[in-house]
Image (tube, rainbow, N blue to C red):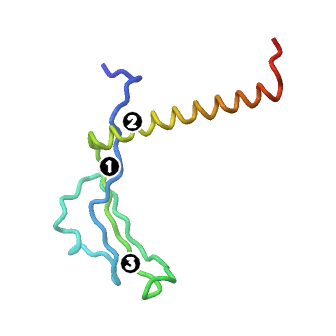
C-alpha cells in the first residue's frame, strides 16, 4: 500500500528527438527511433527574425519517463529548501505584523 505522505517519483517530459532545419521533418528523419504509443510529435514552422533565414522548421519528439533517483533526490531537497525559506518569510511577516498591530494580550 502506498503511503501518500511519502514523496513519490513523478513522470517528467523528456525530449528523445530534435529537428531544426530548413525543411520539414520527414519519416526518414525518425524511422530509426523506437517510438511508443504515447510519444508526442511536435512539428511546425517557427518565425524568427534573428534566425539567418527569417525562420526555420522545428520538430521534436517527447516522451514521459519516470524521474531518475538523482532527479528525485534533487527535487525533494529543493522542495524542502523552498518550504524552509517560505516558513522563514512567513515568520518575518508575522513579526512585522505583530510589531505594527501590537500584542493584544
Tag nearer the camera, 1 or 2:
2
- The dot on residue 2 is none
- Front residue of 85 and 49: 85
Q: State which tag comes first along the sequence, 3 or 1.
A: 3
Q: CA distance from mark 3 to mark 1?
A: 24 Å
Q: Residues within 10 Å of mark 3 (few under 14, many from 20)?
A: some
Q: Residue at x 32, y 54 (%)?
A: 14
Give the Cα distance between marks 1 and 2: 19 Å
Say which quadrant the C terminus sits in. Answer: top right
Query: Is 40 in front, or is 105?
Result: 105
- Mark 3 lies on a secondary structure that is strand
Q: Is residue 48 left or right of residue 91?
A: left
CB contact under 8 Å: marks 2 and 3: no
Q: Residue furthest bottom?
A: 53
Kindly identify the residue that appears in the image at 64 percent across and 31 percent down: 90
The residue lying at 57 percent from left, 35 percent from top is 86
Residue 42 vs 79, above or below: the answer is below
List x then y, in percent, for residue 99. Answer: 79, 27
- The picture places residue 88, in percent across and down from the top left corner, at 59, 32
Residue 54 image offset from top left, x and y in percent: 47, 86
Look at mark 2 in the image and give the residue it sits on. 76
Q: Residue at x 39, y 35 (%)?
A: 76
Q: Tally the marks.
A: 3
Identify the residue position indicated by label 3 in the image.
57
Location of residue 80 with respect to 67 vertically, above or below: above
Task: Report the side of 13 relative to 34 (left or right).
Answer: right
Relative to 63, does residue 3 appear above or below in the rendering?
Answer: above
Q: Position of residue 13 (x, y in %)?
A: 35, 52
- Please give the label number shown on residue 64: 1
Q: Earlier in the sequence, mark 2 or mark 3?
A: 3
Whether residues under marks 3 and 1 lie with C-beta atoms below 8 angstroms apart, the answer is: no
Amino acid at each position: 500500500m502506498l503511503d501518500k505522505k511519502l514523496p513519490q517519483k513523478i513522470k517528467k517530459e523528456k525530449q528523445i528527438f530534435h529537428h531544426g532545419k530548413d525543411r520539414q521533418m520527414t519519416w526518414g528523419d525518425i524511422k530509426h527511433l523506437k517510438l511508443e504509443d504515447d510519444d508526442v510529435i511536435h512539428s511546425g514552422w517557427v518565425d524568427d527574425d534573428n534566425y539567418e533565414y527569417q525562420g526555420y522548421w522545428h520538430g521534436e519528439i517527447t516522451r514521459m519517463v519516470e524521474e531518475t533517483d538523482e532527479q528525485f533526490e534533487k527535487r525533494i531537497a529543493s522542495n524542502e529548501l523552498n518550504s524552509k525559506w517560505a516558513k522563514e518569510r512567513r515568520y518575518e511577516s508575522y513579526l512585522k505584523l505583530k510589531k505594527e498591530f501590537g500584542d493584544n494580550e
